């Protein structure tokens, strides 16, 4: 479940999906809260294939959904790709009450809050790690829980295994943020798991049928604030930045060097022995991050969304930020992160203009829309006001090139008022609550999926396919909670967080 946090650690956090007052917050960080069986190039963005049919699948949360009368127990939805794209016709909807899924659906568990896919057992089908960060164990209200659901020829059916918290008494919110990759380059999928502390647990060598690490369980501790749910790692993102064939990890959190504790990211390189935190490098801020090769030079580039404004409520200037939000792009090299470029809605021909609380960079993702070998970028401004409608939201598509992200030409913008896009601009729809670029129709080009807070928190997912050269509204469709068997009692937040 995506959550709204302050731009530094001295403010109390709020749940963006639990209260409409989140729209009024002028500064803040977002966390709403891998490698796949078919991925061959570690600098490209992998897509999930849970049923092994060669067409990308999409998993996302409805982590606030009622299950058997239990409020915010949470559900997970998988839309399986077909040659006509995704819809509710071919899908799985899972909860902790689904046979085989570890645990039991209980009020407040928030099952599906964060997810990460990879082939953890090496059988050729992608599996899905799923967290329930508010799971209660005994007297520990927010202990958290984590499970891996196994892929199969039928996709995700519920069969899975729990990954026990190895140090539950020392932290809470087990699994609140997770990421998958091959951090040691041994050809087996690894899993990084965050919690309320700054210690990140890394399961190397896959996941066994008993929920243990196939090779070893190790830890890293980057220099971020540790404590409650608003602290610890805000986000984990995996990708190969230095082009050595091993997955690196970008850890987002609040820095420890100043009294403000500003948001920052840390690059932690993968090595033959796993993640090497002693070689960590500080990066520009931005909660939601994607890694992929935008300029096709063989190195993964880091894109992070610093969606908050450039000043706090008391007028303090926030480092590396901009009015209305900013996207920071740090290009990869053989030595790791290199030069950084910032993009706002005032950059070049980027649609829109930078305005207070637009939240440009609220969500983002990378994928190759036109098949030219360059990763393209989608960025949301979920709180964008359009046509006099507050917080209706908009997404922008920017294309990759040999020179990086192209802000001079070719940009596209989509809102629910765009001809051919399902729905209408409505207050607090937050179109762009999450975004995903994946090939879900098997043509080799990435299609766009957009989550929204539609209808007061019911949520929806909009499918906008690639026509081979750009994103188009031809063949677009909306997928609603009812299409996936998700109840709209309360605010299920359907489509709030896509799996990475």
Image (cartoon, rainbow, N blue to C red):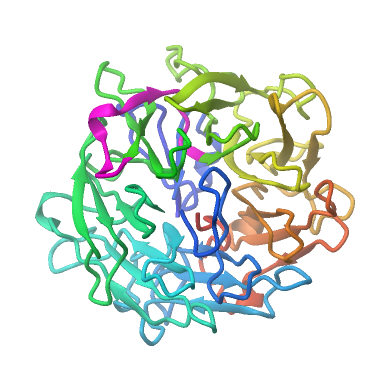
Number of labelled discs?
Answer: 0
Membership of 285 in magenta stretch: yes
Relative side of 153 to 168, left or right: right
Membership of 399 in magenta stretch: no
Whether residue 491 is visible, yes or no, is: no
Q: Give percent across and percent down for residue 235.
A: 39, 43
User: Quarter of the image holding residue 77?
Assistant: bottom right
Q: Residue furthest bottom?
A: 99
The segment highlighted magenta reads 271-289
Q: The N terminus is located in which quarter?
A: bottom left
Q: 127 above or below 143?
A: below
Q: Residue furthest left?
A: 169
Q: Residue at x 52, y 55 (%)?
A: 497
Q: 341 above or below 206?
A: above
Between residue 138 and residue 281, name the one nearer to us: 281
Relative side of 322 to 214, left or right: right
Q: Residue at x 53, y 46 (%)?
A: 20
Relative side of 68 to 375, left or right: left
Q: Give percent across and percent down for residue 258.
A: 27, 16
Q: Give percent across and percent down for residue 161.
A: 30, 75
Between residue 115 and residue 479, name the one nearer to us: 115
Whether residue 61 is visible, yes or no, is: yes
Q: Give percent across and percent down for residue 154.
A: 54, 84
Q: Residue at x 74, y 36 (%)?
A: 399
Q: Residue at x 45, y 23 (%)?
A: 284
């Amino acid at each position: 479940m995506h959550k709204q946090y302050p731009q530094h650690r001295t403010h109390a956090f709020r749940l963006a999906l639990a209260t409409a007052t989140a729209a009024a917050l002028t500064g803040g960080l977002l966390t709403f809260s891998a490698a796949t069986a078919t991925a061959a190039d570690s600098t490209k963005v992998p897509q999930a294939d849970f049923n092994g049919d060669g067409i990308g699948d999409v998993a996302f949360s409805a982590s606030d959904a009622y299950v058997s009368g239990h409020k915010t127990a949470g559900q997970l939805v998988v839309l399986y790709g077909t040659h006509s794209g995704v819809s509710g016709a071919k899908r799985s909807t899972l909860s902790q009450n689904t046979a085989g899924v570890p645990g039991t659906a209980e009020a407040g568990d928030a099952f599906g809050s964060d997810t990460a896919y990879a082939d953890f057992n090496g059988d050729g089908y992608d599996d899905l790690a799923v967290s329930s960060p508010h799971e209660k164990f005994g007297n520990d209200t927010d202990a958290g829980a984590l499970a891996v659901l196994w892929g199969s020829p039928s996709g995700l059916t519920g069969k899975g295994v729990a990954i026990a918290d190895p140090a539950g008494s020392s932290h809470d919110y087990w699994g609140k943020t997770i990421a998958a990759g091959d951090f040691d380059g041994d050809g087996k999928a690894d899993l990084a798991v965050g919690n309320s502390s700054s210690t990140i647990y890394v399961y190397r060598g896959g996941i066994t049928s008993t929920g243990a690490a196939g090779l070893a369980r190790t830890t890293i501790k980057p220099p971020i604030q540790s404590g409650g749910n608003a602290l610890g790692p805000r986000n984990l993102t995996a990708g190969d930045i230095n082009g050595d064939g091993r997955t690196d990890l970008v850890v987002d959190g609040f820095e420890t060097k100043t009294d403000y504790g500003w948001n920052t990211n840390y690059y932690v390189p993968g090595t033959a022995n796993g993640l090497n935190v002693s070689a960590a490098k500080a990066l520009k801020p931005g909660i939601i991050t994607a890694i992929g090769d935008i300029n096709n030079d063989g190195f993964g580039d880091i894109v992070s969304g610093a969606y908050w404004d450039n000043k706090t409520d008391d007028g303090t200037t926030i480092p590396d930020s901009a009015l209305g939000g900013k996207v920071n792009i740090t290009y990869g090299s053989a030595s790791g992160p290199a030069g950084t470029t910032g993009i706002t809605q005032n950059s070049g021909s980027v649609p829109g203009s930078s305005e207070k609380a637009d939240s440009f960079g609220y969500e983002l993702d990378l994928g190759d829309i036109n098949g030219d070998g360059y990763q393209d970028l989608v960025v949301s401004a979920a709180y964008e006001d359009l046509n006099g409608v507050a917080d209706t939201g908009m997404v922008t598509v920017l294309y990759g090139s040999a020179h990086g992200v192209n802000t001079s030409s070719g940009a596209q913008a989509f809102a629910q008022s765009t001809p051919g896009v399902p729905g209408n601009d409505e207050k607090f729809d937050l179109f762009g609550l999450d975004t995903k670029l994946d090939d879900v129709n098997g043509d080799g080009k990435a299609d766009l999926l957009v989550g929204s807070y539609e209808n007061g928190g019911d949520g929806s997912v909009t499918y906008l396919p690639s026509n081979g050269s750009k994103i188009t509204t031809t063949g677009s469709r909306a997928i609603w909670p009812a299409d996936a068997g998700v109840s709209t009692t309360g605010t299920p937040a359907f489509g709030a967080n896509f799996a990475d």
